[in-house]
Every structure is written in C-alpha cells, then in structure tokens.
Amino acid sequence: MPKASRRKFLGAAAGTAVVAALKPSELFAGKDRSISLPQPSTENTESLMSALRNRKSTRSFSDKPIPGQMLSDLLWAAFGVNRPEFGYRTAPSPKNSQEIEIYLAKADGLYLYDPFLHQLACISSDDIRHFCGTQKFVAKAPLNLIYVADFSRLGNRKEEKKLFYAAADTGFISQNVYLFCAAFGLGTVVRDWINRPVLAKKAKLNKDQRIILAQTIGFPG
C-alpha cells in the first residue's frame, strides 16, 4: 500500500508520531497480484471462556484447505485493524510500532498479509511450506504463518531490546490465533524449529527483518 494512502487511511486523529511509526513494508509495493479477503465477521458471539478452555497445541493436520472466510477472520483476529480511525490493531506493540508482519505459506504460494487493505500480497507462487519447519506435519498442513519482525520500526533501541519486544508481540499475536482456532475447530501449534537463514531467503526478507516464530494451522488430522 503506498505510503500516502496509508497515512490518509489512518487520518489526522492518529497523530504525527503514530503515522510515522506505521510506514508500510516496501514488500507491498509492485506485487504482481494481490488477493482481497472477505470482510471479517467480527460479530460472532463465540465464548472467550470456551476458547480458553479448549486452547491446545495440535501436531496432526488434515490437508483440507481453510475456507476463505475463515482465513479472513483468522488473520483479522491475529493482527487486523480493529480501530480503523486510528489504524490500531488487535494486538499491542511498543509505542504502536506494529513491527510484526505476517507471512502465509500455502500450497499455492507465499503471501504477505496487508492488514490495512485486508488483503494478501503475493510474494511467490512457489509452495515453500516444507521450508517453514523441520517437523513432518509442517509441509502437509494447509497454512503456516511466519512471524517476521521489521526491526527498522523499533527505532534506535539496542538489538536485545528489539528482540525482546518482537518476541513478546509475536506471543500476543500467536495467542490470538490459538484462541481463534480453539473457537472455530482448527488445530494449531507455534514453533521455533525453523531453518531461519533458508526460510528468510525463500521469503525474500531484507536486512532489517527477522523471523521470530512460525505457526502451523489446519483442521486436525
């Protein structure tokens, strides 16, 4: 999404400091194709307490694709825009830096989630799921989310502080995903067993981007 459009979207009420922090990833520019997602269904009345009771990790998945509406709702729950007038999101970040970007590895390619347009920008048409982790179920499951921190959005903080914030913020987002999956019959597990240099190359990451964790999602097998 062009920088000017993003700032217009946020509106004057967001304030100069907030708008400056929310510069869009350069990866959104010049993509061959984008896929618009259905509008998220945010009025669902599923019980939070029920989702907490049913939250668990799953390591056996069907290869059944995740329907479009469910994928849309999942991404919105993970780190979508829940207060459009300010550009604020469903998970917190330090000084609203919003440094975590969500990549999706699916059978039909690799995508980057644009929360402001609520669409997927195509990075590659290659199936790179088998690069997303060392466990066998990773390549079969229909969806792997890759949580990538853009350290340039965290200013001049020390490296260890940037890693701390990125890890904490990924935890908030991945727990949102866990609760969504528990509420809607999906299985999921967050993972650290990743060959980060290889996956970073496949995802075409730049020097400021770091892979923090990955999360596998699908119907339980």
Image: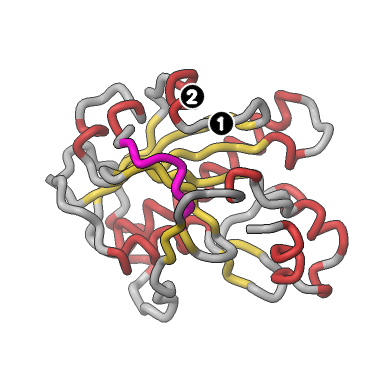
Q: As displayed, is residue 74 above or below residue 45? A: above
Q: Amino acid at mark 2?
A: Lys
Span shown in magenta:
120-126
Task: Tell me the quadrant of the picture where the C terminus can be found.
Answer: top left
Q: Residue 172's x, y, as percent?
A: 53, 49
Do callouts 2 and 1 mark residues in contact (Cβ within 8 Å)?
A: yes
Q: Residue 67's x, y, as percent?
A: 25, 63
Q: Quadrant of residue 45?
A: bottom left
Q: Is residue 188 visible?
A: no
Q: Amino acid at mark 1?
A: Leu
Instruction: Give the Cα distance between marks 2 and 1.
Output: 6 Å
Q: Residue 199's x, y, as percent?
A: 43, 26
Look at the magenta stretch and give its main secondary structure.
Answer: strand
Mark 1 residue element: loop
Disc 1 target residue:
205
Taking the spot 75% from the left edge, 70% from the top edge, the residue there is 8
Taking the spot 41% from the left edge, 19% from the top edge, the residue there is 195
Mark 2 residue element: helix
Nearer to me, 90 or 104: 104
